[in-house]
Amino acid sequence: MSDKTILVVGTYDTKDDELNYMSSRIVAQGGQVMTMDVSVLGNPARPCDISKHDVATAAGSSIQQVIDSGDENTAMQIMARGAAAKTAQLHRDLKIDGVIILGGTMGTDLALDVCQSLPLGVPKYVVSTVSFSPLIPAERLSPDIQMILWAGGLYGLNSVCKSSLSQAAGAVLGAARAAESPAADKPVVGMTSLGASCLSYMKILKPALEERGFEVAIFHATGMGGMAYEKIAAQGGFACVMDFALPELGNLLAGSVVNAGEDRMLNAGNAGIPQLVAPGCLDLIDFAGWQDIPEQYSDRPFHAHNRLIKSSALNNDERRETAREIAKRLSGSSAPAHVILPIKGIEEWDKPGEPAHDPEGLNAFIDEMRNAVKAPVLLSEVDAHINDQQFADKALELFDQWVADGTVRKQ
């Protein structure tokens, strides 16, 4: 059974044995292989389906120009652009069903660009000497990327590295066979949230939106979830968004690594997607469990959510800053944007008697939101908590108005 074709990418001048070993494992399981060489100086032992010349051309260059570019880093960035462009084209032409890339730090740098070039649902496997390393910033990671450590294989094949290579080969072929790409048979509402113990509006909104004929994709706003949400928004993948959990924006402003990148809250507006926005959980800053709390937050109480995340509180000035930043990011939207402001609280733990209850800070934020949000962005206040039925009712009221006037399309 030769049902799926996997693109195998790497520097075939130096890693020919390892790349061919992975290809052989894919073929042995009934898959097909297409090979792409991203070498610069050397040549593979036998020709690849996509040569290094093809890759350089896809980057608008030539191998000689790549060699003459000055240094290895610059050269590989050119090859990365070409490899990403070529890979995306192969997928659009229905010639590949998944990709696997092998490399050290140079190859991994290229691999991240290649994976970013493919849409959600296409299997992307990276076999790397730096898998899961803090060298890799979160914003370089594709929403559904898979990585495995290339252990013990820096120079030549052996039984240790074959374990990783064979697992990866089987995984990418199995994923290509099992993957269900987004169906695109219903319009999708993209929603951000956190766990239901903190933000529970999704329990009301999801079934209500599904009854209206929409599919609802809910993204966990802890960094990677926001990045996935933003990437799909940038591709125009939503009919509307309900961006109701914004801690990633506060984290970005505070310098926490638990953020979704500099383009948080920008892509939906740039893509012309209508936005309903609320400031869910924008009173806390999340830090990685291993991250030292910055000095300016050291005198504030913090909560260790688990060994991965701990949170500290924003002060009044910082909450005003986040309000201004929300307004700034929405101001450039090319589609309607409407802020819903729940004036009785923005996450479960800021209710009276709970550890994050801070009426002065909430009032400072609300006051700044009132001043900062300007037309054409609209603002509606709700005399309720974000987890109350009244908040969900307001969101559905505005959504229904947009459906009725054609702002949100059902087709």
Image: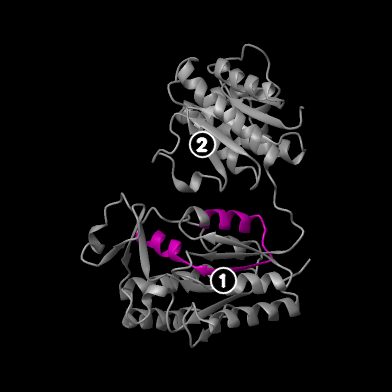
| Above or below, 236 relative to 244 | above
Task: State the residue in front, 224 or 172.
Answer: 172
Q: Residue furthest left?
A: 299
Label of residue 203 in the image: 1
Residue 401 - label? none
The amino acid pointed to by label 2 is Met
User: Can residue 71 be seen in this snapshot?
Assistant: no
Q: Residue at x 77, y 38 (%)?
A: 93
- Indicate whether 141 appears above or below 162: below
Give the residues drawn in magenta, as a range.
226-254
The correct choice, above or below, for 213 with respect to 119 in the image is: below
Q: Position of residue 210 (x, y in %)?
A: 69, 69
- Residue occupied by mark 2: 147
Cα separation, mark 2 vs mark 1, equals 33 Å
- Residue 328 % position (x, y): 49, 70
At x 68%, y 30%, the residue is 6
Q: Is residue 65 left or right of residue 223?
A: right
Along the line of sight, the residue nearer the viewer: 407 or 24: 24
Whether residue 349 can be seen here: yes
Which tag, 2 or 1, sits closer to the chain's start? Answer: 2
Quarter occupied by the N terminus: top right
10 Å crowding of disc 1: few (<14), some (14-19), many (20+):
few
Q: Identify the amino acid type marked 1.
A: Lys
Task: Using the rendered view, name the quadrant where residue 66 is placed.
Answer: top right
Residue 242 falls inside the magenta stretch: yes
Residue 48 is inside the magenta segment: no
Secondary structure category for the residue under label 2: strand
Where on the picture, by quarter, is residue 126?
top right
Q: Secondary structure at mark 1?
A: helix
Q: Are marks 2 and 1 in contact (CB under 8 Å)?
A: no
Residue at the outermost bottom position: 383
Can you say whether 271 is above or below 181 in the image?
A: below
